[in-house]
Image: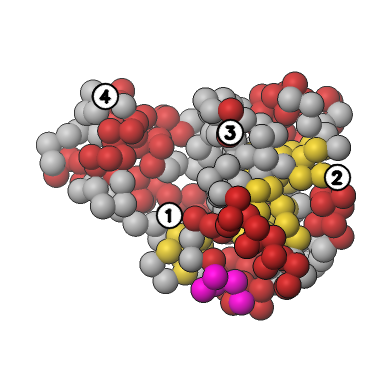
Amino acid sequence: MRYDLHVHSTASDGVYAPAAVVRLSAEAGLSGMALTDHDTVAGVAEAVAEGRRLGVEVVPGIELSLQAGDDDIHVLGYWIEHEDPALATVLDELFTMRVERVRGMAAKLGDHGHALDLDDILAEADGGAPGRPHVAKAMVKRGIVASMEEAFAAWIGNDGPAYVPKSLMDPRRGFELLRRFGAVPVYAHPGLSPWRDLLEEFVALGLQGLEVDHPKQGLAIRAELREACRLRGLVATGGSDFHEAWSASRALGAEGVSGETVAELRARRVISAS
């Protein structure tokens, strides 16, 4: 049995609809997958229904963005109670924050003589949580840039003239949110952030695992993360961080875990009333 525990859909910045991602998982021979869209669970119900039809286990998930100092940190939450209306209320707040961020980017582009409407960006998101990839796609369609890569390099990258930083939850509130709605928290692609400085704080807040196997993490960092899991009693997880089928290293199932690891994660779930 093999599971990919880091998958995105059109509910955030993926290319395929939630049901389509499940179908691709079935075609890839996966036993299961976790739908982990950014700051939203909007696609989970559709994915779960398609998983039942195809015999693919879909783990309801989310990839929550947190602010730790100057760093944007991502924490995956598995088996989140996605149908709880109280969760929807909190996530609506995050959605609004995302809309305001891309609105700010459009305004900055306008200050530089490039007209881009908020509606253009939201159309690219198609109802999903808007982010920089949707800004980039809208810029390409408007002819402001020739490619998404140019959009990031020249305008909306972290040092670009149209960049707007995220307004995010602090770690304590984020971990409390995940715990409140029954999710098992795992530090996403920690090797891309100052994880050594944050690990003890996150463990104290309830962290249960580290995403060890990720396409952007080399063998040396994976070994270090695996040892950190051993020393602190955390689960070593993995996922492809799938958004679209453009690279073999990011294909569905290119990174993943066994059924035993999924069972170990599931056993750590604490269900509490919201």
In the image, 251 versus 266, the foreground residue is: 251
Q: Residue type at mark 4?
A: Ala
**Residue type indicated by callout 2:** Gly
Separation of disc 3 and disc 4 at Cα? Answer: 25 Å
Which amino acid is tagged 3? Ser
- State yes or no: residue 198 in magenta: yes
Look at mark 2 in the image and give the residue it sits on: 259
User: Mark 2 against mark 3, which lies toward the viewer?
Assistant: 3
**What residue is at 85 percent from the left and 45 percent from the top?**
259
Depth check: 23 or 31 in front? 31
Could one spot residue 42 in this view of the protein? Answer: no
Which type of secondary structure does the marked residue at label 2 adopt? helix
Q: Nearer the viewer, mark 3 or mark 4?
A: 3
* Dot 4: element: loop
Q: What span is in magenta?
A: 196-200
Residue 185 vertical position relative to residue 240 in the rendered view, above or below: below
Mark 1 vs 4, N-terminal side? 1
What is the x, y in percent for residue 109? 20, 41
Name the amino acid type tagged 1: Met
Where the N terminus falls, by quadrant?
top right
Q: In front: mark 2 or mark 4?
A: 2
| Residue 147 in view of the camera | yes
